């Protein structure tokens, strides 16, 4: 199946009104944006800026920072001034911190309707945001929903997904009553079916863009799987305009997983896609270390090409015929191929170097430039002089507007 055919099996993208978070468009016809969140003390400007820069270099489009107290709010003007990407202030409980964030020049707000329940306080924030042209995310979390009203005897509480939708609609109504429409909505839960149902139901009711995520998804392995299932289901249905993969790990681990989800659905391409067979009894080479070396090298280069590492000379080129380049190894030698066509055969000692050499040729042909070749094999990986990672053509890049 070609890339175009694969894309056609996805549901049409849900039509949403566009909003702008700083220079980044969310919704409308914009590609899915990738977000993450710092885990530093926001008041520590240098540490927070360093982490923002690391996330931006990985391709993060927007970064959220916690604003739990006055010290964090006081750090925002410097963070906003020096950040390479738009910043969102994460606000809970105290609406005055939202006001301080707006006055600091923040690009977006996240408000939790589960813990700022006074409509007058919400209105005060909305008026200030409207005056400054700053969007607001109505960010519902299943773990911090508004309290339930008293139930009649024998009455069952509503399902969690409905409580989430109702909490979002409560705050959306306040915003709309003030003529405010720069709204983004999230309905996050650890439970994937609850999260998916909440977004599906909300999609029937509003045309605002959605920020997708599975909250508190867990450590890297299980959290990545849980996030991929929840976020992937909705994206395949055409729902979702920006995503965050929430892992109990360094935030830098979140961004590659987010891009892997988008790449798996052909929604956005950044960096290399690695195709590799799952190994079986037919393999006659040490495949797994080779896969790891190939991934490390080509991901560091950052160019959006597809690289295959196959362990079967007979079926490898055919099974990975859509790959830009690849190797199929067996019995001490391997076939280097492009788009399924074998271009040369090399001994096992040259597997990595030959694949890298062919990859540089493809990059040069397609992009008109390529970084210098690394010398050596595994030891040379750390000495790759990489250009800034680039995204593929077409719908891959997020829309950005020029700043005045």
Image (cartoon, rainbow, N blue to C red):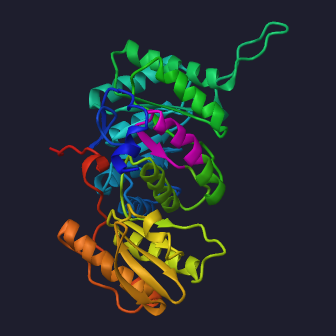
Q: Is residue 93 left or right of residue 205?
A: right
Give the percent coordinates (x, y) of residue 74.
41, 48
Residue that appears at 44% across and 35% down: 240
Q: Residue furthest right?
A: 154
Position of 95 compared to 267: left or right? right
Judge by depth and name the residue closer to the eye, 295 or 163.
295
The residue stretch that appears in magenta: 227-245
Q: Point out residue 155 in the picture as x, y percentages from the top left corner.
A: 80, 10
- Extreme front residue here? 314
Give the residue at x 66% y 75%.
281
Q: Nearer the viewer, residue 223 or 19?
A: 223
Among the 4 quarters of the image, the one containing residue 273: bottom left
Would residue 211 be seen by someone viewing this image from the given angle? Answer: yes
Determine whether, in the image, residue 344 is placed left or right of residue 191: left
Q: Residue 59 or 274: which is nearer the viewer?
A: 274
Most distant residue in the left direction: 404
* Number of on-image labels: 0
Residue 242 painted magenta: yes
Residue 205 lies, with reference to residue 295, above or below; the image says above
Quarter of the figure that contains the C terminus: top left
Can I make out residue 385 in this image? no
Residue 190 drawn above or below residue 43: above
Write the residue at 25% across / 53% down.
393
Which is nearer the eye, 28 or 275?
275
């Amino acid at each position: 199946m070609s890339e175009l055919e694969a894309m056609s099996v996805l549901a049409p993208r849900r039509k949403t009104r566009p909003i702008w978070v700083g220079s980044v468009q969310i919704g409308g016809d914009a590609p899915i944006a990738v977000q993450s969140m710092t885990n530093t003390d926001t008041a520590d400007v240098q540490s927070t800026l360093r982490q923002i820069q690391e996330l931006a270099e990985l391709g993060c489009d927007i970064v959220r920072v916690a604003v739990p107290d006055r010290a964090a709010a006081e750090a925002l003007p410097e963070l906003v001034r020096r950040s390479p990407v738009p910043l969102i202030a994460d606000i809970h409980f105290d609406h005055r911190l939202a006001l301080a964030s707006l006055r600091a020049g923040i690009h977006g707000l996240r408000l939790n309707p589960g813990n700022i329940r006074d409509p007058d306080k919400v209105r005060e924030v909305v008026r200030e945001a409207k005056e400054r042209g700053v969007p607001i995310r109505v960010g519902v979390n299943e773990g911090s929903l508004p309290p339930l009203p008293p139930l009649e005897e024998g009455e069952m509480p509503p399902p969690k997904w409905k409580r989430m939708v109702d909490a979002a609609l409560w705050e959306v109504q306040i915003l709309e009553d003030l003529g405010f429409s720069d709204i983004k909505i999230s309905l996050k839960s650890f439970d994937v079916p609850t999260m998916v149902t909440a977004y599906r139901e909300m999609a029937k009711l509003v045309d605002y863009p959605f920020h997708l995520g599975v909250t508190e998804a867990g450590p890297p392995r299980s959290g990545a799987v849980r996030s991929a299932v929840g976020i992937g289901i909705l994206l395949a249905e055409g729902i979702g305009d920006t995503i965050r993969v929430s892992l109990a790990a360094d935030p830098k681990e979140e961004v590659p997983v987010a891009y892997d989800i988008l790449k798996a659905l052909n929604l956005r391409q950044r960096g290399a896609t690695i195709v590799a067979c799952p190994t079986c009894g037919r393999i006659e080479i040490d495949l797994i270390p080779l896969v790891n070396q190939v991934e490390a090298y080509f991901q560091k280069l950052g160019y959006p090409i597809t690289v295959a590492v196959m362990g079967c000379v007979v079926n490898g080129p055919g099974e990975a015929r859509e790959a830009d380049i690849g190797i199929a190894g067996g019995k001490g030698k391997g076939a280097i191929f492009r788009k399924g066509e074998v271009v040369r055969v090399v001994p096992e000692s040259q597997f990595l170097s030959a694949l890298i050499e062919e990859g540089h040729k493809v990059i040069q042909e397609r992009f008109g430039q390529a970084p210098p070749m690394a010398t050596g094999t595994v030891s040379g990986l750390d000495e790759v002089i990489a250009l800034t990672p680039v995204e593929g053509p077409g719908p891959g890049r997020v829309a950005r507007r020029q700043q005045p």
